[in-house]
Image (tube, rainbow, N blue to C red):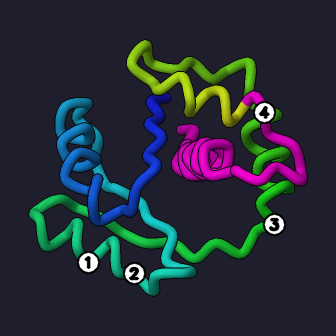
Amino acid sequence: MFGKKYNKHIDNCLDEIISLTKKYKCGTIWTEKNADKGYVCKIINSKGHIADTYHEDMNKYLKISTYLKVNWNNVYFHDETDVDYIQEIMDYTEFAGHDDCPDSSASIIRKLEKKIVIV
């Protein structure tokens, strides 16, 4: 897993995010559409990168506990992952003031688990 923590508005870091997805040969960028109604997805697509949305309806604490915590021993963080990203995960509690990093990690794991097909 690769994680980067930004302390600025998405409009001010989107080009870097798209650049990183190309650098690491990632496919679709998945964005939560709850708050922005798909705004970020539309911008990414307009910049020529594939993006899609999902609606989040799972309790955040439950999602992090179910996906990230349970799979923690199977997670390997790329060497270039921001230390702040991992630190926010390590500091996470149910009542944490900041939870974007553990939330995004749990969402990635959930998405990957749903894509696994055993033949």
Mark linked to residue 42: 1
Residue in the picture at 77% in, 60% down: 60
Q: Earlier in the sequence, mark 2 or mark 4?
A: 2
Question: In the rendered image, which residue does mark 3 sit on?
Answer: 59
Q: CA distance from mark 2 to mark 4?
A: 30 Å
The x and y percentages for residue 24 are: 26, 30
The three-letter code of the residue at mark 2 reads: Gly
The three-letter code of the residue at mark 3 reads: Asn
Q: Does the magenta portion include 103?
A: yes
Magenta span: 90-119
Is 41 on the left or on the right of 109, as rendered?
Answer: left
The x and y percentages for residue 25 are: 22, 35
Label pair 1/2, CB-CB below 8 angstroms: yes
Q: Earlier in the sequence, mark 3 or mark 4?
A: 3
Is the residue 9 above or below the residue 100 in the image? below
- Element type at marker 1? helix
- Disc 4 packing (10 Å; few <14; some 14–19; many ≥20): few
